[in-house]
Amino acid sequence: MDQAYTPTKREQDFLATVQDTRHERDIINGLDPFLSEKVPADMLGLYTPQELVQLRVLKGTERDLEKRMPVKVTRHYFELAKQSAPLRRLVKADPAETLDLAGSEDPGFQMDYSPVEGMLHKYEMGLLYVISTCSAHCRFCYREELIARKEVKRQDGTVAKKGLANIPDVVGYIKRFNAEVAGNGGRHPVCARS
């Protein structure tokens, strides 16, 4: 049976100096709070009445925006978006984003460059998916399929959801990859990366 961890005296002393910086972020998850006017009054202005009608009509249809990408905005991003049209474009769901849903679910072939779950190793670096949440869901997000928990078809025909990184698996992959590079004179024998 695992015992609960007890911080050392030194750790306790350090933790006593840490200030709690938690604060309410006024997170709005989904379109429903906007559609039912249950967001803070000043945030209702993010969408015009006409936009809300368009979004309501699409709900539950093939073009439901939240099936493509969940809607999420915080007070911070809302305040920034009030002053910036480009930022409004980033965080506001727009019916136009579902006009043409054709195309690849994985246009950058990220799933094909995921040697272990939660890691993208497409170039000379690795990108780890360690969390699946954000303060706001940018409407162009390349992590859309991770946030929306969508299944993505890979080039080899398999279908799977993107998952978060399992650090021991990632460490094992990096060690194997580096050993193969070292054993091949500084270049990987398959992809030729160093």
Image: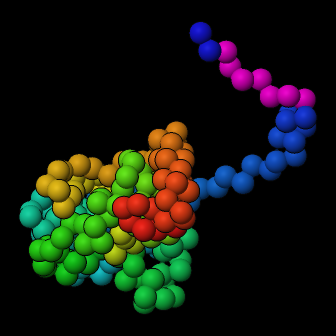
- Residue for point 48% across, 74% down: 78
Q: Quadrant of residue 47?
A: bottom left
Q: Name the side, left or right, on which 145 lies relative to 178.
A: left
**Whole-percent x, y for residue 152 in the image:** 21, 57
Colouring used for the render: rainbow
Does 16 appear in magenta? no
Residue at the left extreme, as displayed: 62
Look at 9% across and 63% down and name the residue there: 61
Q: Is residue 69 left or right of residue 41?
A: left
Residue 84 location (% of width, % of height) = 48, 89
Q: Nearer the viewer, residue 103 or 18?
A: 103
In the image, residue 19 sits, relative to residue 168, either above or below, namely: below
Q: Nearer the viewer, residue 44 or 103?
A: 103
Q: Is residue 159 left or right of residue 41?
A: left
* Residue 35 found in image quarter: bottom left
Q: Which residue occupies 72% across, 54% down?
A: 21
Q: Is residue 37 visible?
A: no
Is residue 179 or residue 90 the one in the foreground? 179
Number of residue marks:
0
Q: Position of residue 12 (x, y in %)?
A: 86, 34
- Can I make out residue 180 in this image? yes
Secondary structure mostly seen in the magenta stretch: loop
Magenta stretch, residue numbers: 3-9
Give the residue at the far top of this rendering. Answer: 1
Q: Position of residue 15 (x, y in %)?
A: 83, 40
- Is-magenta flag for residue 5? yes
Q: Quadrant of the N terminus?
A: top right
State the residue at coordinates (77%, 23%): 6
Q: Is residue 12 above or below residue 19?
A: above
